[in-house]
Structure formats: C-alpha cells, structure tokens
Image (cartoon, rainbow, N blue to C red):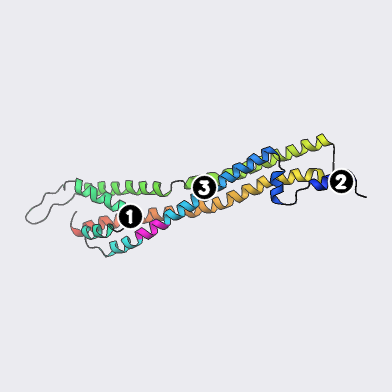
Amino acid sequence: MIPVFAQTEAAALPTNAWELVTTADPVTQVVLVLLLGLSLMSWTIMVSKWRDFRKVRSTSAAFLRSFERAHSLADVAASSRGAAGSPFVRVFERAESFLSETKPAMAATPERSAKFSASQIEALRLVLDAQTDSERELLSRFIPSLAMIASASPLIGLLGTVLGIIQSFIGLSTTGSGSVAAVAPGVAAALTATAMALAVAIPAVFGYNVFANQVNRLEGQLEGFGSELIALLVREGRF
C-alpha cells in the first residue's frame, strides 16, 4: 500500500508546462511575466523592422534602376517622384536642396556656365554624409533594444531560477520532507524561468544580427549613392 504522504505528494506533482507556471512561487511568476513582456517587445520590434526594410527595398529598387540610366540631375528628379519615402530619395533631395541654396563660386562667362568650386564639392560631400548618418539612425531605431533584450533576458531568467530554488528549499525545510517528490516540483517550476529566458533571448539575438547587417549594407549603399551623385554632377558640368 502507498503511504498517505506519498499519495499527497504525487497528486501535487505538475503534469504539464502550464501547471509548472501556476504552481510556481510568486517571485518566479513575476519573472515569467516580465520575460513574457520582453518577448512581446522583441517580436514587435522584429516585425516592425522587417516591414520597414521591406518598404525601403520596394520603394528604392525602381529609383536606383532609374538613377543608373540618368544622364542629368533633372532625370534623377523625375524618377524620384515615384519613390517617396526612400532613404536614397531623401539623400538626393538633400543634395538638390544644397545645390539650389548655394551660389556657384565660379561665375558664368561666355565660354562656360557657372560652376561650383572644389571646396563646395567637399561641402556637398559633408552634407551627403550627414544625411546618410541621419538615415542610418532612422533605420536602426529600436534595433539596439533587441541586443539589450538578448543580453538581459538570460540574467533575469537565472535570477528567477535561483530565487525559485531558494523558495523550494525553504519550503522543504519547513515541511521536513526529504523526498525527491517534495522538492522536484519547486525546482522544475523555477527552471521554467531559465527556459523562458532562453526562448526570449535566442530570437532576439538572431533578429539583432540580421537587422544590424541590413543597416550596415544600406549605409554602404547610401554612401556609394552619394559618390555616384557627385560623379553625375561632375559629368553634367556643375563642377
């Protein structure tokens, strides 16, 4: 015959993940709720950035193809009208604004038109670099939060596990029972915090690396676009 205390312990054993959570001590449950909130934040950021980069690619592809075939600044301006919202268009518009607000240093003569000086070319390059940095900041918005979530979640989960195990041993010393069945449910419930933390951190690590690489690639493309834009102006005789 099974002793009464053994039957009571067996009945109290959780049989699934949900029961592990519901039977966990309050401290572990608070940690699990915090990790759930971080997970929702992480996935929200990743879905949002995926949409942002998809929009950038779709709005920029046609404009870049048109830019490759352009022979003048007017051709680029015409193709930019259908690509509103693209970071490449904003860089071009910044250059166009600079050219319209800057008076050429070399006055026009009967033999040649007015031209910009070398120092004005350098100023335009600085303006394009500043706009590229602004676009990078806009594209990388919230991405560092993924790194923070990925690094903090395991520590939070470990804290919940340690506190849960402490509570289990305190309860064990209070009841005076030394059987595995008495301590196993509390330890298992505490370990769910670590498992939950890993489930939060792993997607955040992948998401951070994927989106950070995309930001770096787009930044390189924007820098190359600025150089090609200056080369187009040179071919057009603006400098």
Where residue 55 sits in the image (x, y, percent)? 40, 56
Is residue 59 part of the magenta span, yes or no?
A: yes
Is residue 178 part of the magenta span, yes or no?
A: no
Q: Please, what is the three-letter code of the amino acid marked with disc 1?
A: Phe
Q: Which residue is mark 1?
A: 88
Q: Please, what is the three-letter code of the amino acid marked with disc 3?
A: Leu
Q: Is residue 32 left or right of residue 45?
A: right
How many numbered marks appear?
3
Q: Please, what is the three-letter code of the amino acid marked with disc 2?
A: Ala
Cα separation between marks 1 and 2: 71 Å
Where residue 7 sits in the image (x, y, percent)? 86, 47
Cα separation between marks 2 and 3: 46 Å
Which residue is outermost to the bottom?
A: 69
- In what element is the residue under mark 2? helix
Main SS, magenta residues: helix
Where residue 40 sits in the image (x, y, percent)? 55, 47
- In what element is the residue under mark 3? helix
Q: Is residue 2 visible?
A: yes
* Along the line of sight, the residue nearer the viewer: 18 or 135: 18
Q: Is residue 113 left or right of residue 133?
A: left
Q: Which residue is mark 2?
A: 6
Provide the residue span drawn in magenta: 54-60
Q: Residue at x 35, y 59 (%)?
A: 60
Q: Which residue is mark 3?
A: 146
* Along the line of sight, the residue nearer the viewer: 39 or 21: 21
- In what element is the residue under mark 1? helix
Q: Is residue 171 left or right of residue 22?
A: right
| Circle on res. 225 | none
Foreground disc of the pair 1, 2: 2
* Dot 1 crowding, Cα within 10 Å, few <14, some 14–19, many 20+: many
